[in-house]
Amino acid sequence: MNRLFIEFYLDEDVSRLVADLIRARGFAITTTQEAGQGGRSDEEQLNYAVGRGMTLVTHNRADFELLASRYFNSGVKHYGIVIAVQRPAHEIARRLLVILDQVTADEIENQIRYV
């Protein structure tokens, strides 16, 4: 598909400030709240991100590792999952910017990255 820039989709548990900080650098990012997806299950969140070609960012390691495994085992493609350790929003944004600087959207497909 030859996509260059990753577009992040923040799960509900990730601070909205992260989105503001990423947008300030000119990158596309959407929060669960902005997408009207609040209160949906983890599987629904990932399905939403996949349906729009977005990379999901979450703090929820256990559930999303399991979902990624299910996708892998069924041969369904996702556009990346970034699992962020609970840190201040500025630190998470800094780490996401490193990914945006070093990884293309095509390269993150079907991967889990940890920040």
Image (tube, helix red, strand yellow):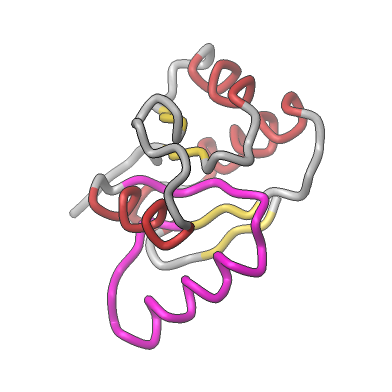
Q: In this view, does 91 lie above or below 62?
A: above
Quadrant where the N terminus sits is bottom left
Q: In front here: 17 or 4?
A: 17
Q: Nearer the viewer, residue 109 or 48?
A: 48
Residue 66 on image: x %, y %: 54, 76
User: In the rendered image, which quarter is residue 54 located in?
Assistant: top left
Residue 84, image x and y in percent?
69, 49
Question: Does the magenta-highlighted stretch encompass residue 60?
Answer: yes
Name which residue lies at 48% across and 80% down: 69
Q: Which residue is drawn at 28% across and 75% down?
A: 76
Tell me the residue at 47%/72% (across/down).
68
Residue that sits furthest to the front in the current view: 39
Q: Where is residue 43? Give x, y as percent.
A: 41, 62
Q: In this view, does 83 lie above or below 29?
A: below
Span of residues in magenta: 54-80
- Residue 45: within the magenta? no
Give the residue at x 45% y 56%: 41
In the foreground, 17 or 43:
43
